[in-house]
Amino acid sequence: MSGQATMSGFSPGVYREVSKGDYAFDVVPTSNGQVSIKFTAKNTAGSVHEQIVNLNVGTPDYTFTTTAQQSTTTLGNPITVSYSLIPSTGSTQTYQVKFDGGSSEGTLNGYQKGVWFDVSANSNGTFTYSPNNVGSHAITVTARSNFGVEKSATFNVNVSAQNFDFTAATSSGTGTINTPIAQQFTISSIGND
């Protein structure tokens, strides 16, 4: 056998006694590329027959999407981002994700840009994106399987400054030298801060 695979009930280079009939078994590839399996059958009279079977093995695929649950927010107010990470049928994979926002600054689940972190497979989950600057954020999240397959999805969010009200007042519009004149100002937040 060339390439890497396991076959239940068989060991490479070892004959196993069988009788006439059809035999079914599974080959489990353990690496990418071509796997060539050479089957050799011999009878007690010494006749030998060989057959080579070639398998082209690819990496398991998966789908990955992200969707921001809102397209606008104010600075200091994180948004929830839904994601879906679904592996192809029958594959066992582990996954990590990272994000890149270009000139946009922020964190995803508390992680900085470019830092890989683990996520669950077969899941529809959420991330929390916390923007750190005002502007239009185009955030690309990249998922990577343990087989090295990467998929990217982008979400967009516009981040504005937190607005507030400000009023200032004086108790009197006139005064004299060395005499205090009472002043007052009020700042009230608009929004979530």
Image (cartoon, rainbow, N blue to C red):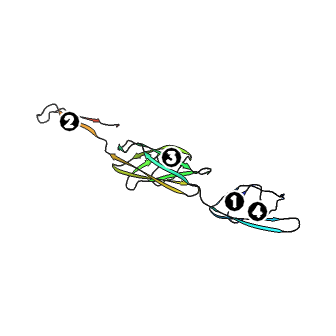
Q: Residue at x 31, y 42 (%)?
A: 162
Most extreme residue toward the front is 21
> What's the residue type where badge 3 is placed?
Ser
Mark linked to residue 168:
2
Q: Earlier in the sequence, mark 2 or mark 1?
A: 1
Which quadrant would residue 103 be assigned to in this image?
bottom left
Q: Residue at x 50, y 43 (%)?
A: 125
> Does residue 113 sit above or below 166 in this rendering?
below
Q: Which residue is mark 4?
A: 12
* SS under mark 4: loop
Q: How far from the left and from the top, in percent, is residue 52?
A: 72, 66
Q: Residues within 10 Å of mark 2 (few under 14, many from 20)?
A: few
How far apart marks 3 and 4 lie (CA) works out to 40 Å
For the residues labelled 2 and 3, say whether their Cβ atoms are less than 8 Å apart.
Answer: no
Q: How far from the left and from the top, in percent, is residue 140?
A: 44, 53
Which quadrant would residue 173 be assigned to in this image?
top left
